[in-house]
Image (tube, rainbow, N blue to C red):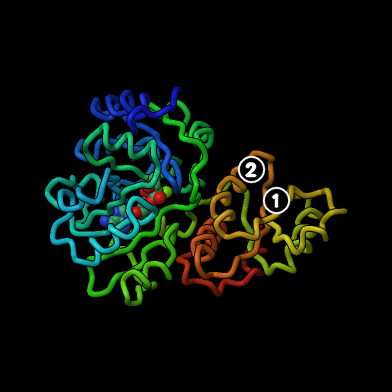
Amino acid sequence: MTLTPEDGIYPDCLRAADVLRAGGIVAFPTETVYGLGADAENAKAVERIFAVKDRPLSHPLIVHLGGASQLDDWATAAPDSARLLAERFWPGPLTLVLRRSGRVPLAVTGGLETVALRVPAHAVALSLLSTFGGGIAAPSANRFGAVSPTTASHVCEGLGSAVDYLLDGGPSRVGVESTIVDLTGAQPALLRPGGVTREELEQALGCTVLTDARCALPAPGRHPSHYAPQAKVLLVAQDEILTEARRLRAERHRVGLLLPSPFASAQASDTEHVVIVVPDSMVEYARRLYEFLWEFDRRGCDAIVASLPCEDGLGLAIADRLRRAAGRGHYKDAGASAKSQKTAL
Ligand code: TXA
Ligand code: MG
């Protein structure tokens, strides 16, 4: 694959766009995670995405656009707040939920009258979108319920030959999915925390964003057991990670640890576990979180012990994904105790 741009167009994107036009499905890089794309206006191609992912048809997809100027082609009656956020954050890890236009097939929205739109901030994705010209409906390129891919090899591992064409754009820079904001109600509502922080949104909008909103339909990013690796994830307090890992080890589990750096030296003499030291920077942690979960699976762990980071900035999205990996509910459900997790193994 020759991913070198000529005038901003990557040669492989020409082929990938042809695959989309022929009704095929293309895995492509974005700054958040890899997407599995189809022509958003081809209901048959969109249905294939659901089949390949093993995803229920009622779970809506995000339509990816090449630029904010296309917003009114895909949404109707977009409020000023949509334009403001699009101008501020697109291209970028923000998805806007708006009323759908007639251009959006119900196959994409799972029957909803709303549509989720985003312009990804990745040169290869933007090259594909501009070459293709239309909207690309794309969920993350993983099987339903599994960990999202942040590299092309994750996509191969998870979906293999089920994909017609794979564009390799290197590791994803943001590493967690886009933030989803619903702008169809009286007040903006955060449906999924992600690469754009709640603080950034509120600052741009000049108002608070609802954080306890629910989707009209069950949706995968809001499913309690979404983003789960093969191994069971247990969430405990930071200073209990090593004790918990030793307890599980004594029960003959192969244990992976996501260890905050202050505790890293304490385990230097403890070589029985697979240890990944969590980056101190939240940007770096978000970027690598899914890579870490893939790594534990690859190294044969059947249990992962971790703790939640502070939930401001990107910490909110990281904590949300860790909770879902542990099979817990919505990110507001902060209270579930470590004990109930322990009995799960
Ligand atoms: O970063 C991302 O958003 C990645 C990349 C590939 O763009 N995509 C992604 O797609 O995470 P997916 O399908 O894994 O998650 C899409 C989320 C789902 O949780 C779904 O609920 C929500 O978008 N969604 C889509 N359409 C919606 C709608 N009309 N109303 C509410 N939520 C919607
Ligand atoms: Mg997904």
In the rendered structure, the answer to whether residue 322 lies left or right of residue 270 reads left
Number of the label disc, if any, that sits on residue 302:
none
Label 1 environment density (alpha carbons within 10 Å; few <14, some 14–19, many ≥20): some
Location of residue 302 in the rendering, given as x and y in whole percent from the top left corner: 67, 47
Q: Along the polypeptide, which appears first: circle 1 or circle 2?
A: 1
In the rendered structure, the answer to whether residue 226 lies left or right of residue 264 reads left
Who's the residue at 37% across and 52% down the image?
92
Number of the label disc, if any, that sits on residue 295:
2
Location of residue 212 in the rendering, given as x and y in whole percent from the top left corner: 38, 73
Q: Please tell me in which quadrant of the rendered image residue 185 appears.
A: bottom left
Name, please, the residue furthest toward the bottom: 207
In the rendered structure, the answer to whether residue 278 lies left or right of residue 102 reads right
Q: Is mark 2 within 8 Å of ligand 2?
A: no
The residue that disc 1 covers is 276
Q: Please tell me in which quadrant of the rendered image residue 261 appears.
A: bottom right
Could you tell me which quadrant the C terminus lies in?
bottom right
Q: Amino acid at mark 2?
A: Glu
Labelled pair 1, 2 in contact (Cβ < 8 Å): yes
Name, please, the residue furthest toward the front: 7
Who's the residue at 27% across and 32% down the image?
131
Q: Please tell me in which quadrant of the rendered image residue 306 appears.
A: bottom right
Location of residue 186 in the rendering, given as x and y in whole percent from the top left corner: 23, 74
306 versus 231 height, above or below: below
Query: Rounded to the nearest whole Å, what is the CA distance between mark 1 and mark 2?
Result: 9 Å
Q: Tell which of 73 and 273 is nearer to you.
A: 73
Could you tell me which quadrant the N terminus lies in?
top left
Q: From where the camera sits, is residue 162 visible?
A: no
